[in-house]
Amino acid sequence: MTGLHTVSGRALERRDVERLLKERAPYCLVDCELEECDLSRLDLSHWSFERCILKNAKLVGAKLANTLWRNCKAGGADFRGTDLEDAAFRTGNYSNASFRRAKAASTVFTGCKLTGADLSEIAAFGLVFEEVLLMSAKLPAFSFRKSTLRRLDFTQADLRQCDFRDVIFEECSLRDANLVDARFEGADLRSADLGGLKLGDARYFKGATISKNQTGQLLAELGLRIA
């Protein structure tokens, strides 16, 4: 983002951010410390955060549309109910953060760590994940329909009732994920890791395409031998 005022290398509290907001201009915060800072319900639209620390920060109900996040550390941060429309998260650690009920239309996560993150009930039309770690993340009933997923790690993720119809998986992992009532009709799973599949889960892949090699692996996972 260009044309932003920059604040660099400072430890900030809510009152400091509110003071900046009074100037009515978006800011670029660089190398700033906002750990456990309460920024709930503030309008930070069009702001930029670069290499900032926001561990356990509270941003509940904040307006974060068109924000840019680069290589931030925000583990355990609370983004519940935030407006993230057109926001871009480029690298960074958001492990165990909560995005529950956030508005994430056209939001992009690239190269981020979202291990254990809660994305339940997120309004996500046009949300994009690329090369993201989603291990143990919560995404129940999330729709990925007709998208191409690249290098996503869903290991042990909660994917109950997710819609993967007509999805192309490129170097993704579904190992040990909870796939109860997920749908895969028309999906291309030939480059996905399906390890840890249980006998009861196999039916959820009805209508999907897998490789011959995967067929052998799945049969082995299910305790069957090919004679």
Image (cartoon, grey):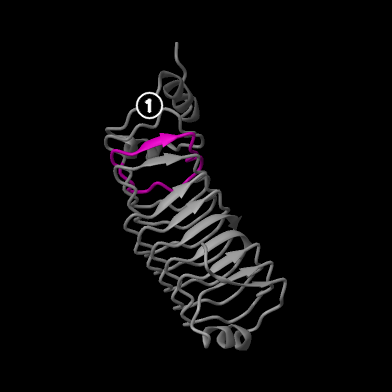
Q: Residue at x 41, y 58 (%)?
A: 107
For label 1, the crowd category at 10 Å Cα-Cα, with few meaning under 14, some 14 to 19 and many 20 or more, is: some
Q: Residue at x 69, y 73 (%)?
A: 33
Task: List x then y, in percent, for residue 31.
Answer: 69, 67
> What residue range appears in magenta?
165-183
Query: Can residue 114 be seen from the camera position used here?
Result: no
The kind of residue on which mark 1 rests is Ile
Q: Name, please, the residue furthest toward the front.
A: 3
In the image, is 145 to the left or to the right of 179? left
Magenta part, dominant SS: loop
Secondary structure at numbered mark 1: loop
Q: Residue at x 49, y 76 (%)?
A: 44
Task: List x then y, in percent, for residue 132.
Answer: 52, 48
Q: Quadrant of residue 148?
A: top left
In the image, is 110 to the left or to the right of 65? right
Task: List x then y, in percent, for residue 190.
Answer: 41, 27
Q: Quadrant of the C terminus?
A: top left
| Count of numbered badges drawn on the protein | 1
For this rendering, which residue is in front, 97 or 62?
Answer: 62
For this rendering, which residue is in front, 20 or 144?
Answer: 20
Task: List x then y, in percent, for residue 200.
Answer: 38, 40
Where 54 sits versus 220, above or below?
below
Where 34 sits versus 105, above or below?
below
Residue assigned mark 1: 210
Query: Can residue 197 be seen from the camera position used here?
Result: yes
Magenta stretch holds residue 211: no
Q: Residue at x 49, y 43 (%)?
A: 152
Magenta stretch holds residue 178: yes
